[in-house]
Image: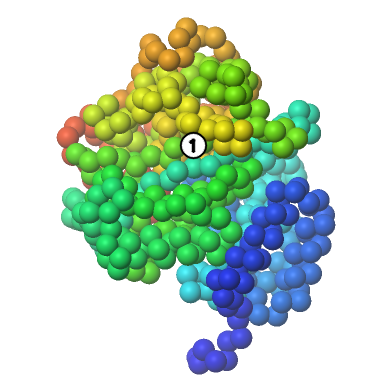
Amino acid sequence: MSSELRDFLALSYGELEDLNLEAKEQRKNRVAASKLQEQRLKYLTDEKRIKAVTVLFSDLEGRLHMLDYDKKFLVKSWDNLTFDGSSIRGFTAQRESDLRLGIDWSAFYWAPSDVFGSGKVLVFGEVIDKNGKPYSADIRGELKQFANKLYKSEGYTLNAANEIEGFLFKGVDAERNYYQTGKFEYVNTGGYYHSLPGDPLRTFIDTTAEVQRAMGFENEKDHPEVAPSQFEINYSYGEVVAAADQIQLYKLICRQVATNMGMTASFLPKPVVGVNGSGMHTNISVSKDGKNLFWDAKGEEKVSEFAWSFVDRILTHGNDLCLLLNASVNAYRRLDPHFEAPNQIKASAVDRGSMIRIPIGNEKSARVEVRSVSPDANPYLVLYSIFKSGLQGDKLSVKNLRQAERYLPDNVYTAIENFRDAAWTTKLLGADVKGRYADLKQASADRCARLLGTFVKIPEVQYHHDVYNQYLWNMF
């Protein structure tokens, strides 16, 4: 069919950025959900060039799922969008499969048509159980409820920014094809900060950054990372649920841009042995009435007692949370002390082997950085577990916050045992969701070699939760 006949929405990157920044400001200012719902539905009704609305949600492991609804259908039936939850790993059993998607109208995005297709807009969904209540395994919903409750009761705004590293490899579906090749091929061997204009890695970074800007990310800097073909594209702080949404969009954008270029963007924590792995350093702070509660000009490292108490609680629960922050077999290759691995359960302003770093900051930027997070972890689980543990967890089991008395596990089996045995993870997630998550991680681990060894094993990649291969999983 001739493309001239298709009068679908396709906006310039400048127009997209304006729309997305306006929506971002509304979200930041907590505009009432009812007002946003009315505004968005009117926009969808009036904008004839939109053909479909893509609703995004994440499963328990953090795998992003997308459903396209015809625009006219969604406008009429937005409050009754049902789907089969039994097909989603970690969600419902077959006998209780019906779930519903609610629409989070504040999390609405206009996307570039040359990357996502014309005539579409994106919105994040909330999973609703049959009884009409938020579904307990939808951690995005749990995070949103937790953040809203703290805002109402304490006036706290939870803030986060993530530094997400990844690798760019030759060929489409490099992870799915790993069983045939047994290796990943670099597209660039330049190293830290070095990539010539026009080479594949620089072109990928530039293109991805342009898409992010158009989608309202408010970029800060981008560059090749330490390892060959490794990248990092940084963007600004955000309220915790929006920050987690941006992690999902970041990875989606990277994968889509790479695929369009005939390559693969991989967020395996350690796809190549012998070079630095990829992390997702998680910068966090808490503010109230516009004031950063982590800042104290006279405090130790210029952060407040409130911040140090937060750090204490995170370190207390370091081993309890490790499976949530490092969610795959491959992630434990990254916790290697030879590559600045953040495996020491301590806090430091300078030692990058510490689980938590206290960066140099000021009244605006004072924060703590949780370094022991892998880029393949469920971002909603990461931020939910860090904030809830830091604010409500146990305290004072760490005698010296600056000295490592314990270390994070070097294999997923120990991490699973720590997670299952911890009373805190039951309080954090509830026994049912905790059990489901542990069972999923156990299933992945049991498909892989127990000892990591000196090279990346094929099952370690093929059965990774981020590598989409429904056929292989159905064989077990």
The colour scheme applied to this rendered structure is rainbow
x then y, percent, for residue 110 = 61, 66
Q: Residue at x 58, y 14 (%)?
A: 394
Q: Is residue 349 above or below residue 87?
A: above
Query: From what the image shows, is residue 217 above or below residue 316?
Result: below
Q: Is residue 151 visible?
A: no
- Image quadrant assignment for residue 296: top right
Point out residue 219 in the picture as x, y percentages from the top left corner. Answer: 51, 54
Taking the spot 38% from the left edge, 60% from the top edge, the residue there is 205
Q: Looking at the image, can residue 265 be seen? A: yes
Name the amino acid type tagged 1: Thr
The residue wearing badge 1 is: 282
357 in relation to 78, above or below:
above
Q: Is residue 440 left or right of residue 218?
A: left
- Taking depth in this image into account, of 133 and 290 the one nearest to the observer is 290
Measured from the top left, where is residue 137 in percent x and y?
59, 39
Return the residue nearer the eye: 315 or 132: 315
Dot 1: what SS?
strand
Q: Quadrant of the C terminus?
A: top left
Which residue is located at x 71 percent, y 77 percent?
A: 47
Q: Position of residue 377 (x, y in %)?
A: 45, 40
What number of labels is visible?
Answer: 1
Q: Residue at x 38, y 69 (%)?
A: 260
Number of residues whose C-alpha sits closer than 10 Å to that of mark 1, classed few (under 14), some (14–19) or many (20 or more): many
- 9 or 464: nearer the viewer: 9
Q: Which is nearer the eye, 430 or 295? A: 295
**297 shown above or below 194:** above
Residue 33 in the figure: left or right of residue 386: right
